[in-house]
Amino acid sequence: MRVYPPPPPPRSSSLLFIFLLLLSLPPLPILARPFVLVLSQDDLKDVQNDDASLLESDSSWDDDDFGGTHVKPDDELDPGSWRRLFEPSTTPISSSLDSYYTAVDKMISASTNGDARLMEEAAAEIETAANTEGDPHARSVLGFLYGMGMMRERNKAKNFLNHYFAAENGNAQSKMALAYTYSRQDMYEKAVKLYAELAEIAVNSFLISKDSPVIEPIRIHNGAEENKEALKKSRGEDDEDFQILEYQAQKGNAGAMYKMGLFYYFGLRGLRRDHSKALMWFLKAVDKGEPRSLELLGEIYARGAGVERNYTKALEWLSLASEHGLYSAYNGMGYLHVKGYGVEKNYTKAKEYFEKAADNDDAGQPKAFYQLAKMFHTGVGLKKNLPMATALYKLVAERGPWSSLSRWALESYLKGDMGKAFLLYTRMAELGYEIAQSNAAWILDKYGERSMCMCMGESGVCTDAERHQRAHSLWWQASEQGNEHAALLIGDAYYYGRGTVRDYERAAEAYIHAKSQSNAQAMFNLGYMHEHGQGLPFDLHLAKRYYDQALELDPAAKLPVMMALASLWVRKNYADSFLVHVIDSLPEVYPRVEAWVENVIMEEGNATILTLFVCLLTVLYLRERQRRHAVVAAGPQEPNEHIVPAAR
């Protein structure tokens, strides 16, 4: 899905001009359902306020993006977060939460070891803390247990109620879960309020000059296989490429120094954030003449990240950055003038800086989306559009501190702890993250059958039915948010009756959804269903069209498409023949043939014998076919006519 740049806005609103220009940044998918955002003049509203006074009157400009006194650390922005268990902090946490964290720790350990008894004990302690002590964070986790059907019956009503009361009492992750639930049901009035609140929290943790990546969401698979290339880049200091980069930095390479600073400052490539190391590398890079480090140094001093906060130094570094053509630094300078940090408040000058940043398309995507979402939400500058506002707010909200779940899940996966990775991705999936939904489902499909203990069901280790049902549910959610591989697997689930009742019509609907995203496998499947009249009308012409389209999209599909087209030819020319019955029986025979191939044919020597045997059968078939054609060409013969062999 693409977000197209809008037409030029009315000259009466320079502030609107700033935000609309931000849309020329690289596009992001912003709604689960396919659509194209095109802003026309009808969407725009003429704002009469003077630009400077609008800056002063708009409370959103009072958001302190530098980590001012009212901005809280992540543990407070995301109360009840599991960060304490994965990233021990020096920040003191109320002892009243000790029992809650003890129970969650047991739950995580149980998922690692596949210990059903320990998981039940943890679930009981969480339920006690939620219902008896009224702990909102325990109530949030209890809602998660009911939603997934872990040591409790799967119950959507109890899942919703627990998240509702947890959110009412300040649990941010329950707010994310509720907002996602509302948006899935098109209840945008409720969803937009929650996502707006969560997006504001996320924005407060972003950078001065551009947004903070915070967490790199990594898709651990690329469909059917593990995404080895992406995972290789997430192994932190153990990664060979990182070690080479570190060596180059130590030898004085300015570019390598800058990258080292970035990795440690943002916590990229599987590294833990380390502001002190980031500051060290950025300073070294500046000494070597690397200008890109300047704006990050301005950010560090403005936020007081790994160094005492100093707004005067921040402005100095940002000014130097802008002199070197890093125009995104103007955004930070604008905010310093809005807040009067290290400089006298000056809204007119701030406006000039914001315009310079916007004119160079480098003002920071999530902040731009946040302001655009506010405009769609309130109807200021643009026509009110709650579905659009909800989608944009969701994009920003997903960058909040709760996204740390992704980091811990990936670390667990890379260490081979599939149970813990699955638990964390599942928790994140409930908050509406498509990548987490996809990753959790993939882990379940890939490792669940071999290690059933990684999946906890209603009364212990998942049954086969529970595992299929859970994977089906996760893939379905990912499919709703535009994941074409998920849509394909949903079709397979309905087609084969895995985790759900067999339903060819719903399978066809899922394949059509995947096909709309130009998925070759989905097109092949639709051709097959048309060929056999399963869930779709029997239509050999449409079947051929889908097979041809599958080949056009994916040349690697040449062999199966050729076989499918051969099947179509046989079905068209020899309807109801023995050969057609053989072809139709193949889906039932295939599993037994596959087992035979694995157990017998693949033994040493057998494959060669089988190949020769198949070649012999092929030769005999072709000779017989040639003989029949010769007989037909010769025409009918008289009964007593002697046939004289042709001379050789």
Image (tube, helix red, strand yellow):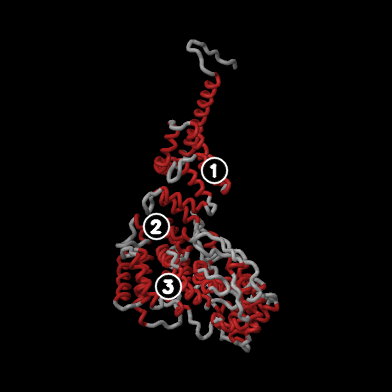
* Residue holding disc 1: 545
- Which circle, 2 or 1, is nearer the viewer? 1
SS under mark 3:
helix
SS under mark 1:
helix
SS under mark 2:
loop
Left or right: residue 357 versus residue 380 is right
Query: In terms of sequence position, does the residue under pointer 2 or pointer 1 come before the other?
Result: 2
Residue 448, disc: 2
Q: Residue at x 50, y 60 (%)?
A: 33
- Kind of residue at disc 1: Arg
Locate residue 99: give its quadrant.
Answer: bottom left
Depth check: 432 or 306 in front?
432
* Residue holding disc 3: 175
Answer above or below: position of 442 versus 558: below
Answer above or below: position of 53 versus 480: below
Q: Tell which residue pokes out farthest to the bottom in this image.
A: 344
Residue 305 image point, x, y percent = 55, 81
Question: What is the distance, in whole Å, between disc 2 and disc 1 at their CAs?
Answer: 37 Å
Mark 2 is surrounded, within 10 Å at the Cα level, by few (under 14), some (14 to 19) or many (20 or more) other residues, namely: many
Residue 188 image point, x, y percent = 46, 68
Question: What is the distance, in whole Å, between disc 3 and disc 1 at their CAs?
Answer: 47 Å
Mark 1 is surrounded, within 10 Å at the Cα level, by few (under 14), some (14 to 19) or many (20 or more) other residues, namely: some
Question: What is the distance, in whole Å, between disc 2 and disc 3 at their CAs?
Answer: 30 Å
Query: In terms of sequence position, does the residue under pointer 3 or pointer 1 come before the other?
Result: 3
Q: Looking at the image, do the residues carrying marks 2 and 1 touch, with CB atoms under 8 Å apart?
A: no
Residue 38 image point, x, y percent = 59, 63
Depth check: 513 or 614 in front?
513
Left or right: residue 96 versus residue 199 is left
- Residue 421 seen in the current view: no
* Picture quarter with the N terminus: bottom right
- Kind of residue at disc 3: Lys
